[in-house]
Amino acid sequence: MLTYKVQLYPNKQQQTTLVEQLDICRKLYNRLLEECKKAREKGEKLTQIKTQSFIVWLKNTSMPELKGVHSKVLQMVNYTLWTNIKSLAQLKKNGHKIGHLRFKGKGWYKTINYNQSGFKIDENKNKLTFSKIGTINCRGFNNRIRTNKVKGIILKRTQTGRWFANIQIENTPIALPKTNKSVGIDVGIKAYVVDSDGREIENPKNIERQLKKLKNKHKSLSRKKQGSKNWLKAKYQLAKLYTKAVDQRKDFLHKVSNFYVDNYDIICVENLNIKGLTQKGNKKHKRSRTLHRNILDASWGIFFNYLSYKAVNADKELVKVPPRGTTQECSRCGEIVPKTLNDRTHSCPYCDLEIDRDYNASINILKRGKGYASLLVENRPLITITASAFVSGQVFSMNQETPTFRKE
Ligand SMILES: [Zn+2]
């Protein structure tokens, strides 16, 4: 199962309905939980089927408001409750010390779960229709959603009050046409990606900007009195900014990973221990760079993750190679050319190769991934591609020059 996230743009009335429905779901959850607790006190045992039929009874007696919510959604509230009960029991079985399930306070029930029925996807327009809610405009549709069977849709409200739909589809791989091309990719700090075809994809600048803003907002939040009106406001702004930064980064990573999966059959990367990466850098600057590095580390992990599942779906291959010495080794003659973190160029005293340091590493990654003993590498400058060119869709196919090396 694959999940795609699209943003919803409900109108005022729909927003009210959505919030109301969330609260009805929350109340139902609490009511069912209460029933389970009562039964246990009496020494009786309830089952998922019993609480399910209890919902029907509630609809016609003390909770007529349940009629305003799609029946499958109510069923999923029951399902959620029992999933929680079962996982708690499992924890207990494994010897964990656990408490009881808690009632959910206002605002603590966050999803409306449409499973298998009660929704319709408009194939031509970006619209989703939900039973008992209406037709909602949305953004972020793709062909996968339009052409595959949708199993269910989960509506979710974020902390900042935005609504998203997680669309679950059956995972049917769609093989992409073969290109007979392979590539090595080196991820870094200076450029986000340098590949063995000589492309250098810059780090998205907006992320740097966001980072600065985030830092400032953090500072201003810490100066405010916890729980005060201004504190809440700053907290909301911080959450909003953070979500925006995360969204922008994901968008960038989706586009870069799509580019490589579309254009190459075999993609080679270093098998990085992402956690260990923070120690790889310049220790002197470590403290000042921690936030920056943490974010980069996380994004490399996400990037490799995207590459991995997209490659599987497209019938392409992601090869992870041992990272040891990819920077030091000369990609043409194989000799070790030691360099410090500040040496940006690989200049080999043995064979006169002079290329960008990360470019050299990416060719070594390709060599290892493909098992080549040697490659004929020529001196050449990198082609720099800005992150915004990627995000705006200017770069989507291989109109770049062909690689200047060939297998010997
Ligand atoms: Zn050399």
Image: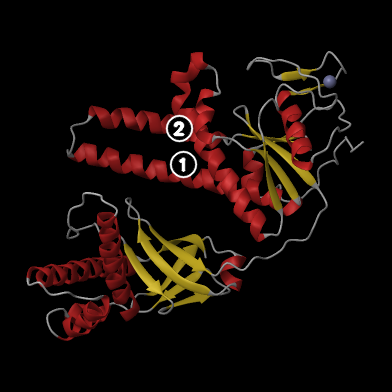
Dot 2 falls on a residue whose secondary structure is helix
Percent position (x, y) of residue 363?
77, 33
In front: 218, or 405? Answer: 405
In front: 152, or 312? Answer: 312
- Residue 211 marker: 2
Residue at 23% of width from left, 41% of height from top? 232
Which numbered disc, 2 or 1, marks the residue that appears first in the sequence? 2
Please determine whether, in this image, residue 384 is positioned above or below residue 144.
Answer: above
Q: Is mark 2 within 8 Å of ligand 1?
A: no
Label 1: how many residues lie within 10 Å, few (<14), some (14-19) or many (20+)? some
Mark pair 2, 1: CA separation? 8 Å
Please determine whether, in this image, residue 311 is positioned above or below residue 55.
Answer: above
- The answer to whether 24 appears left or right of 321 in the picture is left
Please determine whether, in this image, residue 12 is positioned above or below residue 60.
Answer: above
Residue at 50% of width from left, 75% of height from top? 121
Residue at 73% of width from left, 39% of height from top? 184
In front: 122, or 169? Answer: 169
Residue at mark 1: 245
The reply to whether residue 252 is in sight is no
Residue at 37% of width from left, 56% of height from top? 162
Q: Are marks 2 and 1 in contact (CB under 8 Å)?
A: yes
Label 2: how many residues lie within 10 Å, few (<14), some (14-19) or many (20+)? some
- The answer to whether 102 appears left or right of 363 in the picture is left
Badge 2 amino acid: Leu
**Splitting the image into 4 quarters, where does residue 341 fall?**
top right
